Image (cartoon, rainbow, N blue to C red):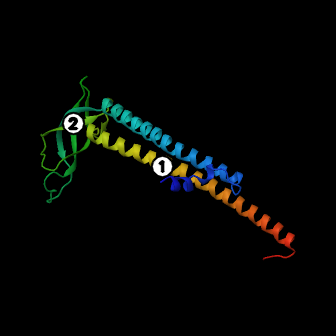
């Protein structure tokens, strides 16, 4: 186990073969690991919190209202089966007594005069029903995971870019050293 750890951490050991670019690469990789872990946690938690707060704000602004189905939508003879929704004209009154009429998605089985729950934004405009607490939690966790994964990807991509530039620099150094060695021996290898 210690032998393998020594091989894995070779950039940190003193060696006549170790170059400055090897030490720089070691520090970049260490910083990338730390940034990836900490950045993913922070990005995930911030994203999940922001999504949760937005959903709660939307839920607080939405109000359920009881509306009456005034008119079915144009269905023809064929009505969707079961729990399908169709467009219909509904009428509802705000708490201050203001009446509103608009088109909304209603159950296909509803007939004119049926009472239907619609959601409004407090200004008389229809909105979609707010997501449930379980849906909000699921979406927040999923958003946090995506943000964390994106952060890890960005950090890993940046570290890989830095590593490739260091490799290019090392290859150029090796080419220069080989050229010097060839001229010292009085011949060229290429």
Alpha carbon separation for disc pair 1 and 2:
46 Å
Residue found at the far top of this picture: 96
**Mark with earlier residue (1, 2):** 2
Q: Using the rendered image of the protein, determine whether residue 168 is visible from the camera's viewpoint.
A: yes
Which residue is found at the position 36% from the left and 46% from the top?
142
Residue at point 40%, 43% (across, down):
144
Residue 10 placement (x, y as % from top left): 60, 54
Q: Nearer the viewer, mark 1 or mark 2?
A: 1
The answer to which of 186 and 135 lies nearer the viewer is 186
Residue under numbered circle 2: 91
Residue in the foreground of this view, choosing between 1 and 86:
1
Compared to 179, does 139 lie above or below? above
Whether residue 132 is visible here, answered yes or no, is: no
- Quadrant location of residue 77? bottom left
Labels in figure, total: 2
Tell me the crowding category of disc 1: few under 14, some 14 to 19, or many 20 or more residues within 10 angstroms, Cα based: some
Q: Quadrant of residue 131?
A: top left
Q: Residue at point 21% right, 50% down?
A: 86
Q: Quadrant of the C terminus?
A: bottom right
User: Which mark is on residue 150?
Assistant: 1
Secondary structure under tag 2 reads: strand
Q: Does dot 1 land on a helix, a strand or a loop?
A: helix
């Amino acid at each position: 186990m210690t032998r393998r750890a020594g091989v894995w951490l070779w950039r940190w050991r003193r060696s006549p073969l170790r170059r400055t670019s090897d030490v720089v690469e070691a520090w970049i990789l260490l910083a990338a690991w730390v940034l990836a872990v900490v950045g993913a946690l922070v990005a995930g938690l911030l994203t999940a919190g922001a999504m949760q707060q937005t959903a709660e704000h939307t839920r607080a602004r939405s109000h359920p209202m009881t509306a009456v189905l005034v008119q079915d939508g144009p269905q023809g003879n064929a009505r969707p089966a079961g729990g399908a929704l169709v467009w219909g004209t509904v009428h509802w009154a705000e708490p201050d007594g203001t009446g509103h009429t608009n088109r909304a998605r209603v159950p296909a089985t509803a007939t004119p005069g049926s009472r239907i729950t619609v959601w409004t934004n407090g200004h008389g405009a229809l909105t979609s029903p707010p997501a449930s607490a379980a849906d909000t939690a699921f979406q927040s966790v999923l958003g946090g995971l995506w943000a964390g994964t994106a952060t890890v990807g960005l950090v890993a991509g940046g570290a890989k870019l830095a590593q490739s530039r260091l490799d290019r620099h090392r290859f150029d150094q090796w080419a220069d050293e080989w050229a010097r060695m060839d001229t010292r021996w009085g011949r060229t290898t290429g």
